[in-house]
Amino acid sequence: MTIWNRTYECMSRDELEQLQLERLQATLNRVYRNVSFYRKSLDAIGFVPEDLESLASLESLPFTTRADLGAAYPYEMFAVPLREVVRIHSSSGTLEKPSIVGYTANDLKHWGNLAARGLVAAGVTRDDVVQIAFSYGLFTGAFGLHYGTERIGASVVPSSVGNTRRQVTILRDYKTTTLVCTPGYALRIARCMEELGVDPKTLSLKQGLFGGEPWDETVRRAIEERLYIKAYDNYGLSEVMGPGVASECAQRNGMHLAEDHFIAEIIDPATGKTLPKKETGELVLTTITKEAFPVIRFRTGDVTSLDAGPCACSRTLVRLSRIMGRCDDIVIVKGVNVYPKGMGPILEEVTGVEPAYQLVIDQKDFQDVLAIRIEVSEAFFFDKMEKQRGLVDRLRKKVRDTLGITPDILLVERGSLSREQETAPMVIDKRRTPQQGR
Ligand code: DLL
């Protein structure tokens, strides 16, 4: 069984905790010196980084939230001068102020290595041809796994997302062995293959790494049967690094978390109290090697648990269970993090004033479908049909251009959403696996 970095992936707990402590100390020093947000929040509790004596003291430090990162827009959270930053990405979605994340050359090196761990754990070797059907852009998914594939020495096919027929042609003609995309897009490719009459058994495809959005064992089975491959889960988030934070091994019984780079805690999202790791709660992550964009006790909003028991693969890193949902307002639609309240200002750019609206999310053949119900104002009603149609087109285009998701726009009668009385929820999520928090 191949392991990309045996020294770190199979460390004894004692050695790992010593390493974590040293790295945490260095990180706290760095943020205290260079990031005013952390200096202020640590000063407020009278904590001096030199005082850190054990990993347990991390629990006494304040959390960092998405709102904190948003308030630091664009670069206030950077712990190095921009001159040392060689790459900038940002979180996907509708947050008014998205988190802008930076990487030094060293950060990129670590990112590639951690993504390589996940690829190797899924059986990828230098003989593989890896088709990366994530969008290349501000989204971290494509680049992280791209670097990991190059690090291994396998061949990258950066097909990016979209043009599904072409993806199928590439899969067949380039003899792709490994598909990398969201689980939803894997099934879209599967459907397209079925429509084109391409038999997956005739392809070179062996495995796929899927992540960026929640999925479950039913989706895994559907991917495996329809693409005739083994499907592996991998997890990450832009605020912490991107893909490579945790990845499944051949046992496919949880994702080994790169604890030599990140310290994980599980908390009760309601009280903020730390829970035993095996309990289900919100995942909180602290980066301990990041130079440009370290985060301390970042509340991911993801609901999961950690398994510290031994794994037959001989890796000693804890395993993150499948992400069970979110405990904040964010809903993930086609891999894009949608903050429902952030949709208002997007629609307003077309309608002039923010309309009452409701997001209805459903799935067709495992594909997410987003409909936005928008209350028409009197002004829309008096308009001719043609104008209404124009409005619908402009709204659809605006959302597509901003989020990369093309929604169905449904104009509904005035008063039917009754936001004032709080009777109409802002989001109706009809998907089989609720991706929204509780
Ligand atoms: O989705 C990074 C990524 C890309 C990971 C590709 C893996 C593969 P963001 O756009 O910042 O970054 O979204 C992060 O997506 O907090 C989870 O809610 C969700 N998510 C990511 N991977 C998984 C997964 C990328 N394997 C947010 N299972 C995270 C469930 C996932 N949810």
Image (cartoon, helix red, strand yellow):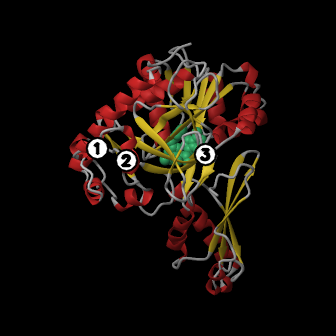
Q: In screen coordinates, is 319 left or right of 37?
A: right
Task: Give the Cα distance between marks 1 and 2.
Answer: 8 Å
Q: Amino acid at mark 1?
A: Leu
- Residue drawn 64% across the image and 40% down it: 185
Quarter of the image with the C terminus is: bottom right
* Mark 3 in CB contact with mark 2 (< 8 angstroms): no
Quadrant location, ligand no. 1: top right
Q: Nearer the viewer, residue 103 or 77?
A: 77
Total labels drawn: 3
> Of label 3 and label 2, which has the lower sequence position?
3
Pointer 1 and pointer 2: residues touching (CB < 8 Å)?
yes
Q: Residue 45: horizontal and vertical position, in percent? A: 30, 57
- Disc 3 from disc 2: Cα separation: 21 Å
Residue shown at the point (44%, 21%) measured from the top left: 12
List x then y, in percent, for residue 36: 25, 56
Q: Is residue 195 left or right of residue 253?
A: right
Provide the secondary structure element on which disc 1 rests: helix
Inter-mark Cα distance, 1 to 3 = 27 Å
Residue wearing tag 3 = 280
The amino acid at mark 2 is: Ile
Residue at which label 1 appears: 28
Amino acid type, residue under disc 3 in the picture: Thr
The local crowd at label 2, few if under 14, some if 14 to 19, many if 20 or more residues have their Cα within 10 Å, is: many
The x, y position of residue 137, in whole percent, is: 45, 44
Q: Nearer the viewer, residue 97 or 167?
A: 97
Q: In this figure, which residue is indicated by the disc labeled 2?
A: 296
Q: Quadrant of residue 293?
A: top left
For marks 3 and 2, give the one nearer the viewer: 3
